[in-house]
Amino acid sequence: MSDQDKILKDVTQGDYKYGFYTDIDSDSVPKGLNEDVIRMISVKKKEPEWLLEFRLKAFRQWQKMKMPHWPHLTLPEIDYQDIIYYSAPKRKASLESIDDVDPELLDTFNKLGIPLEEQKALAGVAVDAVMDSVSVKTTFRETLAELGIIFCSFSEAVQNHPDLVKKYLGSVVPYTDNYFATLNSAVFTDGSFCYIPKGVRCPMELSTYFRINAFNTGQFERTLLVADEGAYVSYLEGCTAPQRDENQLHAAVVELVALDNAEIKYSTVQNWYPGDKNGKGGIYNFVTKRGMCKGDSSKISWTQVETGSAITWKYPSCILRGDNSVGEFYSVAVTNNHQQADTGTKMTHIGKNTRSLVISKGISGGVSQNSYRGLVRVLKGAENARNFSQCDSLLLGDKCGAHTFPYIEADNKSAVIEHEATTSKIGEDQIFYCNQRGIDTETAVGMIVNGYAREVLNKLPMEFAVEAQKLLQISLEGSVG
Amino acid sequence: MEKIREMLSIKNLKVNIGDKEILKGIDLEVKPGEIHAIMGPNGSGKSTLASTLAGRDYVTVTDGKVTYQGKNLLDLEPEERALEGIFLGFQYPVEIPGVSMVNFMRTAINEQRKYKGLEPLSAGDFLKLMHERKSIVGIDSKLTNRSVNEGFSGGEKKKNEIFQMALLEPVLSILDETDSGLDIDALKIVANGVNKLRRKDNATIVITHYQRLLDYIIPDFVHVLYKGRIVKSGNKELAYKLEEKGYEWLKEEVEAD
């Protein structure tokens, strides 16, 4: 092995620094999945009858479904009876102030760099912190309420804004949608809810931070975000989990709704525990994310930086129903060691003059497999639909794989669809050029990879772009083989 | 202790690429303040010599010794050689998409400062330094705002090499065919940059195929590399003679020996 290989290996095999576990009393339901467990979750969350019905319908549907095997992934068998579907840190009946939050919990989020005390929080970012099955704390809620913005945990939204939840829940991702979305619809526990009223531009970044803590627990959160006419919101999602030898399942559903002239920017920095260097442990991240550009001239933009998880399987998508609506997807997916990713997007053009843009950058190191899978679909009535897709793959070393599966279905002759794809290997010449200027290989690889991903990183809000850059560097520690 | 007079001392250097012996015993001494020109026909081993000094891993040193400022150069990693003040002006500068020149050079400068135990340069101070050094090569701000060498013309890439040299202030610069592909104006700018950066305590090795660069950079010594050996050394007159008579003359002379 040459020195360069050795360094690349060191760089890509850096340690996961969020792997700690918080020892905290939790209130869980017994392992396993049946109607009683679902009823128990519903009771614990004091849900109205219609929501229990929604869950049960989904559960009955799910029992008839089979796990799909079409992705380019080596999927293990999952024993759904061996998972705990509800686990909540024990706490007082209600949280009146930050003082009511368990100090252990505060400490956990502090360690993760997410202070929940507002005075310490990142200026301009409101956070909803979700640990295992419940939301721990939502910051800046009062400030946002003054503008009529609702930002709270999903459970609270069910209690306080049932009409909004009832109207939009399942409207973008129906409970019958797919195996994991249906499972989520049956057992989802918490998540974030956000509503931006007509004409309001949300003045701060809204953010949800997900943390899986408890042992053998699946995380099934539900996020619902509605931007009313002319509203704008930028939303961020971050996630980590303790380091464990067992795999843990994360099957979330995110639904976005943008009405006339509304714009939603949804960014994810996904850093679930990826498993160890030999591929043991790690999170299965099987998530359904979809946005509906319901209104005319609305816009939904997904940006994702995917560095964690043992297996990532997700396609944040846009349904461009409104005329002149715009869908965008910017993605950097990094896989290293034994990680697998099958990710991409679906752009469904329904309205006239709808436009979509896809920029995907895959980076693979170690013996990982990284696939882009994308569907661009233009329906009959979508006059003058436009799509441009660009999928680039960067290989670090010669034991990893990069794959591209673009699907195009156009039923309208006026559609213009372009697809560009490139695959490149990180150049020894590039690394040597940096070395010759006094920059060591580790720093050089980080710099080259960040340069490669820059088009996407630039789309992230400032605070997170810096974070994501560092993350890319850490995830690739030791990757060039 | 005896003062080290040589900056660079190459003794009987033999280098292979794969199974093929390219350098067959090179001897060269470079002292501070000197400019050496290495000339020779294509395939004589000029670029291999530059690559060996800079530490590329596809060359294998099979024999000989290279001492640089009292250190065994061949023991050092490429980045250590750079931090010790060796600069290679690339024959084919590499493009690094998405990495801005500012970010690239600021990283390089700060690595150098770290190596010397200095604090990193602030963004403001760095931009000031960049602005000041830009004038030496007359490089356009448009170029320094772009990604490293991306979309640069051949001439712009070479100017950019000299610009980096101006920023890093190396002890020993090795310019590998910096003149190739340059029109006469670009050639003058590049040569002018090299001359301005010349000091008593630094040295330059100019590798070139043509004599014309040496009209603008006046070397103290000219060495002719042929089939992996330095077959002739002299002053700048040797370069003129080569230009006039061509390498054929040399071949005859060497083969007559």
Image (tube, rainbow, N blue to C red):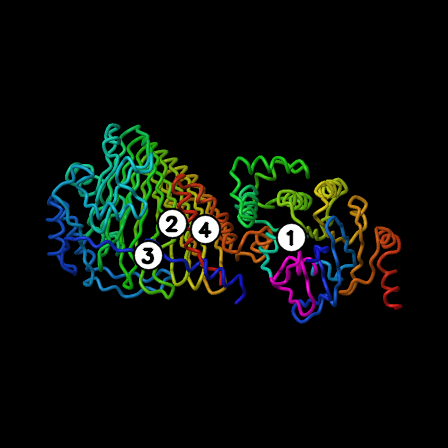
**Is A424 left or right of A75, judged from the image as shown?**
right
The secondary element bearing badge 4 is classed as strand
Q: Within 10 Å of the Cα at label 3, are there few (<14), some (14-19), or many (20+) other Cα atoms? A: many
User: Which portion, as a residue range, is magenta?
Assistant: B49-75
The secondary element bearing badge 3 is classed as loop
Q: Which mark is residue A273?
A: 3
Q: Chain of mark 4?
A: A
Residue A362, given in percent of the width and then of the height, sits at 44, 54
Mark 3 or mark 4: which comes first in sequence?
3
The secondary element bearing badge 1 is classed as strand
Does residue A402 show up? no
Which amino acid type is shown beneath numbered disc 1? Ile
Please identify, in this view, whether the residue under mark 1 or under mark 4 is nearer the observer.
1
Which amino acid type is shown beneath numbered disc 2? Thr
Q: Chain of mark 1?
A: B
Tell me the CA gap for discs 3 and 1. 42 Å
Q: Are dots 1 and 4 on a single chain? A: no
Residue underneath mark 1: B86
Q: Quadrant of residue A201?
A: top left
Q: Are dots 3 and 1 on a single chain? A: no
Q: Are dots 4 and 2 on a single chain? A: yes
Tell me the CA gap for discs 4 and 2. 13 Å
Tell me the CA gap for discs 1 and 4. 35 Å
**Is A112 left or right of A374, judged from the image as shown?**
left
